[in-house]
């Protein structure tokens, strides 16, 4: 046997041995969530996120302290994420000190090319609504109507192929009474519409926020992990 043939055979054997040794590591890495998943049938048309400051205040710079939960999620799935978010806004409340808009006013998010996944992140601000430029406490019925109307709108304009995911509002340690009532309303409306509801309870602990409300790096990672886990599982109502 020639030296070239022997070298080729040894190269082939080493490649096969390497594949056997590396495959378990790749499998483990994917199972632990350390490796991004390719853009498969889950997100071929990208992800759209409508949200409040939990989305709006953060960027798409991997590893940056201000990287958003939505960016971490998109990177995990190797998917393009488009956000339509405004601080202070919600299903009911106008953003930007009562001069902005509500989720339902952002028609560009749900009219036009449909994404694979549409995520609604919000509700933290909907304990109140704007009246004469001031925040006024909102009754349950008003919140319920606003949430239901928005979800009706999404189901009217988005095709059945778009997976709509409704997050329970990411809520820090402040104002637990409103967290309970607003989250309950959103959960109930999501389920009555047959949409996937993802609880974010416990993601924004006192250590995961910078001001009692907005996430630090750990808080954004915690929200992203909850969303990634939900997206990788079969949709549940």
Image (cartoon, rainbow, N blue to C red):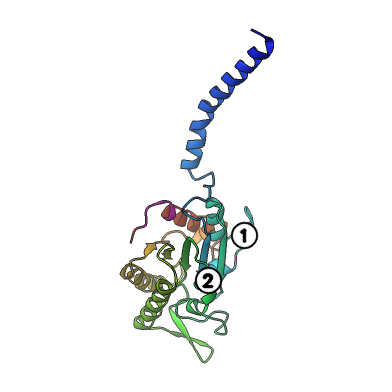
Q: Which residues are magenta?
A: 231-235
Secondary-structure class at tag 2: loop
Residue 172 appears in the rendering: no
Q: Position of residue 182 (x, y in %)?
A: 39, 73
Between discs 1 and 2, the one toward the N terminus: 1
Q: Quadrant of residue 69?
A: bottom right
**Where does the image place residue 106, in percent across and percent down from the top left?**
53, 77
232 is within the stretch colored magenta: yes
At x 42% / y 59%, what residue is drawn?
Answer: 202
Residue density around tag 2, few if under 14, some if 14–19, many if 20 or more, within 10 Å:
few
**Does residue 129 belong to the magenta stretch?**
no
In the picture, measured across the screen, residue 98 lies left or right of residue 235, that is right
User: Depth check: 61 or 200 in front?
Assistant: 61
Proximity of marks 1 and 2: CB atoms separated by less than 8 Å: no
Visible residue check, residue 136: yes
The residue that mark 1 highlights is 60
Most common SS among magenta residues: loop
Q: Nearer the viewer, residue 118 or 44?
A: 44
Residue 162 % position (x, y): 44, 63
**Residue under numbered circle 2:** 112
Measured in 3D between alpha carbons, the distance from the residue under mark 1 to the one under mark 2, in whole angstroms, is 23 Å
In the figure, residue 35 lies in which quadrant? Answer: top right
**Quarter of the image with the N terminus in it:** top right
State left or right for residue 8 relative to residue 202. Answer: right
Q: Which mark is residue 5?
A: none
């Amino acid at each position: 046997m020639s030296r070239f043939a022997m070298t080729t055979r040894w190269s082939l054997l080493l490649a096969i041995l390497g594949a056997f040794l590396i495959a378990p590591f790749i499998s483990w890495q994917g199972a632990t969530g350390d490796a991004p998943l390719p853009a498969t049938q889950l997100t071929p048309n990208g992800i759209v996120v409508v949200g409040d400051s939990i989305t709006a205040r953060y960027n798409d710079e991997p590893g940056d302290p201000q990287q958003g939960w939505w960016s971490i999620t998109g990177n995990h799935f190797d998917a393009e994420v488009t956000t339509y978010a405004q601080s202070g806004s919600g299903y009911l409340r106008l953003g930007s000190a009562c001069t902005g808009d509500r989720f339902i006013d952002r028609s560009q998010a749900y009219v036009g090319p449909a994404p694979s996944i549409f995520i609604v992140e919000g509700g933290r601000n909907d304990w109140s609504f704007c009246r004469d430029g001031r925040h006024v406490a909102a009754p349950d019925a008003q919140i319920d109507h606003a949430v239901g109307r928005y979800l009706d709108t999404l189901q009217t304009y988005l095709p059945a192929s778009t997976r709509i995911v409704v997050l329970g509002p990411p809520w820090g340690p402040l104002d637990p009474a409103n967290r309970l009532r607003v989250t309950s309303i959103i959960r109930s409306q999501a389920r009555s519409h047959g949409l996937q509801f993802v609880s974010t309870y416990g993601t924004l602990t006192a250590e995961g926020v910078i001001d009692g409300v907005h996430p630090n790096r750990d808080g954004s990672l915690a929200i992203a992990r909850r969303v990634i886990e939900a997206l990788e599982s079969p949709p549940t109502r």
